[in-house]
Image (cartoon, grey):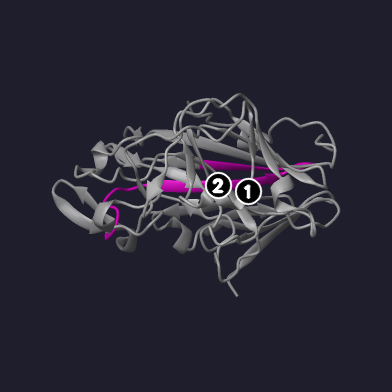
Amino acid sequence: MTDRTLLRNGHISVAVSHLGAELCSLQNSAGRELLWQAGPAWPRHAPILFPVIGRMVDDTLVHNGVRYPMPQHGFARDHDFARIAATPTSAHFRLTDTPHTDRHFPFPFVLDVHYQLDDTALDIVYRLGNPSRHDVLPASIGVHPAFAWPLRDGAPKDSYRLEFGEPEPTPVRRVDQVLLRGENQPTPVDGSTLHLAPDLFADGAIIFDRLSSTSLHYRSDHGDGVTLSWHGFEQLAIWSPPDGTDLVCLEPWFGLPDPIDFAGEYRDKPAQVHLAPGEEREFRLRIAATSPTGQHRTTQSAPHPALAQNEGP
């Protein structure tokens, strides 16, 4: 079995796989598992997407005219991260460029992932750094947590909804073979509420590329819920396998799949972060367990000091 780091504080327990620094278990204070526990329909839990999101045309990255093979959603999720530090309630993992990553991605990088528990929530900070002295680092980064749907056994799937922090009237994007379609589609959000149903995902992921919200609440009236809040990410995807598998993915992104007709250099790909030499950028995700009434069990605490440094733009 792949090495895992366990975190717990009496309120929440977490397991993080060293492969991909992937969150693979998140249990609330009642011991209820909130994450999808991997299976044949989708064998992951909450992978980190780096240095691309979705697919590239021909599964190929082009840099200075040279072609590099690039797997869907990048390679970070399939690489072992080094565990730099750990306490009973926190852990720090790191991935850096190697000769193996250079065969796919010809840029130096440092990707740090910090996990920190408080009473009701898990804070995750993804810090991307460019160690080059001369060259800009272009990249995309995203997270792909899959939550059990339904969260409580026996609850009807169509009783679940997403309540966004702000109204989301802007048209959404869709994909074809995990490449971005050119046309927009009307938003399925009614005001600030998206009622979940399996047929929403018949055309694949729903992508909000002009997002107003920085939080959402995943809930029904039948039991526990989850609140996600994020900082630094600019897009959001929502996905569930169209075969009705009991999971829903809520995915903050900075970046998008390749447009279907994209034929340019990687550095010119739309919606990427570009880090100057020596620059770092942080992206944050907070996952909070909520009660059946939709309220946090305790008030949100201030960020852990180790997670409050180097705030990104």
Circle 2: residue type: Leu
Compared across the picture, whether 277 is left or right of 5 comes to left
Compared across the picture, whether 76 is left or right of 93 comes to left
Could you tell me which residue is drawn at 47 percent across and 51 percent down? 204
Compared across the picture, whether 213 is left or right of 8 comes to left
Going by the picture, which residue comes out furthest to the left?
Answer: 65
Q: Residue 93 at x, y = what percent? A: 55, 53
Say the numbered circle drawn on residue 200.
2
Q: Residue 153 at x, y = what percent? A: 79, 59
Count neighbours of disc 1 (C-alpha within 10 A) and say few if under 14, some if 14 to 19, many if 20 or more.
some
Q: CA distance from mark 2 to mark 1?
A: 6 Å
Q: Residue 65 at x, y = what percent? A: 13, 49
Could you tell me which residue is drawn at 62 percent across and 24 percent down? 166
Compared across the picture, whether 110 is left or right of 155 comes to left
Circle 1: residue type: Ala
Could you tell me which residue is drawn at 58 percent across and 27 percent down? 213
* Residue 256, above or below 16: above
Count neighbours of disc 2 (C-alpha within 10 A) and say few if under 14, some if 14 to 19, many if 20 or more.
some
Q: Residue 129 at x, y = what percent? A: 41, 40
> 41 or 35: nearer the eye?
41
> 111 or 14: nearer the eye?
14
**Magenta segment, which residues?**
103-126
Q: Mark 1 — residue?
A: 197
Q: Dot 1 lies on which element? A: loop
Whether 115 is among the magenta residues is: yes
**Do the residues under discs 2 and 1 have CB atoms within 8 angstroms?**
yes
